[in-house]
Image (tube, rainbow, N blue to C red):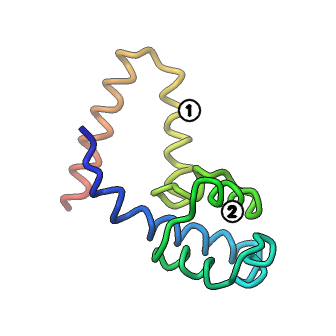
Amino acid sequence: MVDSTLFTTDLPLRLGRNIAKRRKQIGWTQALLAERMKMEPESISRFERGATLPSLTTLELLACELDVSMADLLAEYSDSAYSEAQRVSGWLSKLQPDTRKIVLDGLHKICVLLSAS
């Protein structure tokens, strides 16, 4: 069973950070995003602070306005960590399942060793 407390505590802040980050990347103010979304700037502020969560419909519209996927707005990892994971995934996809398991086990051991030092 999934521990839903992980989602309820992290999700609003993570989503808010990702909305703010993307909005700033494209050089928009909260007021401009709010105007494009036909909502009050305070609503964007609440989303970015993690005070409230948008509805799924609003989340879809936010993603569209910010020219990203909904998954990007909900992503837990930074762009660089995500792109690195995608690169590793590409390498692994070319391996046979048994070999992939060996590589993943080895990678996990290396990460455990390095994080302990």
**Image disc number at residue 90:** 1
Q: In the picture, which quadrant includes the N terminus?
A: top left
Kindly identify the residue that appears in the image at 53 percent across and 71 percent down.
16
Q: Secondary structure at mark 2?
A: helix
- Nearest the viewer among 104 and 74 is 74
Q: Which kind of residue does numbered mark 1 sit on?
A: Gly
Marks 2 and 1, Cα distance to the nearest angstrom? 29 Å
Is 97 drawn above or below residue 76 in the view shown? above
Left or right of 80? Residue 112 is: left
Residue 74 lies, in percent from the top left, at 52, 56
Residue 115 lies, in percent from the top left, at 25, 58
Is 1 drawn above or below residue 84 in the view shown? above
Q: Which kind of residue does numbered mark 2 sit on?
A: Leu
**Image disc number at residue 64:** none
Left or right of 28? Residue 108 is: left
Q: Secondary structure at mark 1?
A: helix
Q: Earlier in the sequence, mark 2 or mark 1?
A: 2
Q: Residues within 10 Å of mark 2 (few under 14, many from 20)?
A: many
Q: Which residue is mark 2?
A: 62
**Quadrant of res 37:** bottom right
- Nearest the viewer among 85 and 64 is 64
